[in-house]
Image (spheres, rainbow, N blue to C red):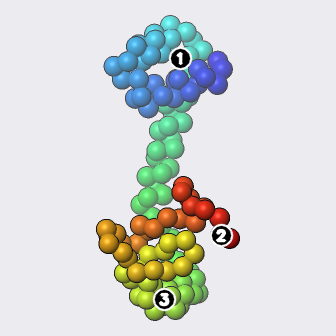
Amino acid sequence: MNEVDLDRLADFIGGAFEGAPSGTQVSHLVSTVPEWRHAHDHLVAADRAVSHDLQLLAQTSPPMPGDVAARLHAALAAQAPAVSALAGSHLTGSHLTAPGPGTTGPGRGKAPGGPGSRPSQ
C-alpha cells in the first residue's frame, strides 16, 4: 500500500468520501483486499487512541507556575497604557494615523509591502 492509498483510506475513515464514488471504491477495497482491511483496522485503532488521548488532555490543564504568571501579568500591565493609546487609531505604512472617512477601525490601512504599495524613496 502506497502513501496515496493510505491518504485515501484515512479520508475514508474520516468520512470525507460519504456519498461519493471514491467512498464506494475504498469500501470495496477494505472488504475484499486483506492489505486494505489490515491498514483500515490499524488506522481506526490509531484514530480512537489519539481521540482518547486528546480528550484526556482537554480535561486537565496544569496550573501555570506562579513565577510565569507573575511575569505575564506584569508584562500585560505594562502594555495597558500603550494599548489604550492605540484605541481608535490604525496603522498605515509604518506610522499611526487617525481613521479617515470610510474606515471602521484598526487594520483598514495598507500593510507595508502589501498589494499596491510602493517602496519608500
- Relative to 21, say whether 79 is above or below: below
Marks 2 and 3 close (CB-CB < 8 Å):
no
- Quadrant in which the C terminus is drawn: bottom right
Q: Residues within 10 Å of mark 3 (few under 14, many from 20)?
A: few
User: Gap in Å between the C-alphas at discs 2 and 3?
Assistant: 27 Å
Q: Locate the N terminus and report the quarter of the image it occupies.
A: top right
Q: Can you say whether 54 is above or below 99 in the image?
A: above
Whether the residues at callouts 2 and 1 have beta carbons within 8 Å, the answer is: no
Say whether disc 3 or disc 1 marks the residue closer to the N-terminus. Answer: 1
Which dot marks residue 82? 3
Q: To which residue does mark 2 refer?
A: 120
User: Which residue does the image show at 54% across and 84% down from the upper left?
Assistant: 72
Across and down, in percent, residue 3 comes to 64, 25
* Circle 3 SS class: helix
Q: Which mark is residue 96?
A: none
Specify the label residue 37 is tagged with: 1
Q: 38 or 108, which is in the foreground?
A: 108
Residue 31 seen in the current view:
no
Q: Is residue 26 above or below residue 55?
A: above
Q: Measure the C-alpha gap from mark 2 to mark 1.
A: 62 Å
**Category of crowding for the residue at label 2, using alpha-carbon neighbours closer than 10 angstroms: few (below 14), some (14–19), many (at least 20):** few
